[in-house]
Amino acid sequence: MKKAFVNSLKPGEAVDDNFVLAEKHVSRKKTGGNYMTVALSDKTGTIRGVVWDNIEKLRDEAAAGDFVHVTGNVSEFRGALQVVVKSIEGRSAADVNPADFMPAARRDPEAMFEKLKNLSLAMTNDHLKSLVQAFWKEERFVEQFKKAPAAKNMHHAYLGGLLEHTLSLALLADRVGDHYSGIDRDLLLTGAILHDIGKIKEFVYERRIDYSDEGRLLSHIVIGVAMVQEKIERIPGFPANTAMRVKHMLVSHHGNREYGSPEPPKTLEAVMLNYLDEIDSKINGIREFMDNQDTNTGWTGFHRPLDRFFYKGPPAVWPVAGDE
């Protein structure tokens, strides 16, 4: 039974527990000889590790993605925690509880999916409704869609994260779609539902969340456009211009080429989708970061991706000077 999780490790503590070997790389020391860097993960997060000794023996103990038993000590290096690893031994799935190693959405996936389906059924554009329903009718797709993460690290990086993010974005689209004139609400909602569908193939998410070969080589945007095109080709009379606008939302939803979009948003619906997607991903990522911070202070630690600290507000009860 797992005793210590990543988010509870402290400098100076001994480590003697099971993890998923998320990554493993052998490198060369400047002074000669090899060393090995690893990433150890469980449902609460990932911690880096380094192996200085017995590299030739330990590097063959397990492959990336395997369950392992690790001993060592926690230290700090360049402002972050790491494990100085003494030993690594492979473990079979029968020796561990898989629920200890994969983070999952707190909300019920069945309830989330039912709510998303109901939103799509309210569409009035028959072609767009048929497109979305074509995905819902595919049992294997729905199974993967309910389980897939939305990211490896930044936001909704847990099982069910893709569904949770998609539902949240669809609800935002549904609420703001009528606020501005000239917005095709059904088109915007379709983009919200389909914008990240390629992530069911971009990631592997059985024992750890990581990129698949297809994901690294193509990206979820390219994968998603191909998936949408395949469904459109099976819908009689699907308008070419509507198909183009749907696919444009997928290729532009990251906003610009620097962030992975082949084209920037060039329609009102695509612009709106880009900003709503950024709002939802940023808020979720910040909230997850806050939840893992010290509850006794009003400020978080430094959030490196966004280059700032975040203010959580005053604690419910401030300590009074002189209290014991």
Image (tube, helix red, strand yellow):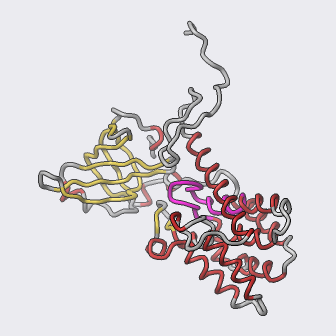
Q: Is residue 236 left or right of residue 6?
A: right
Identify the residue at image location x=56%, y=27%: 297
Seen in the picture, residue 89 relative to 7 is either above or below; the reply is below
User: In the image, is 153 to the left or to the right of 320?
Assistant: left
Q: Quadrant of the C terminus?
A: top right
Query: Which region is colored magenta?
Result: 147-168
Position of 73 compared to 103: left or right? left
Residue drawn at x 49%, y 61% as measured from the top left: 209
- Queried whether the magenta region covers residue 288, the answer comes back as no
- Residue furthest to the top in view is 322
Q: Nearer the viewer, residue 222 or 262?
A: 262
**210 and 66: which is toward the camera:** 210
- Residue in the picture at 25% in, 50% down: 51
Residue 20 spot, x, y in % from top left: 41, 55
Quarter where residue 117 is shown: bottom right
Q: How many marks?
A: 0
User: Which is nearer the eye, 58 or 299?
Assistant: 299
Q: Residue furthest left?
A: 32
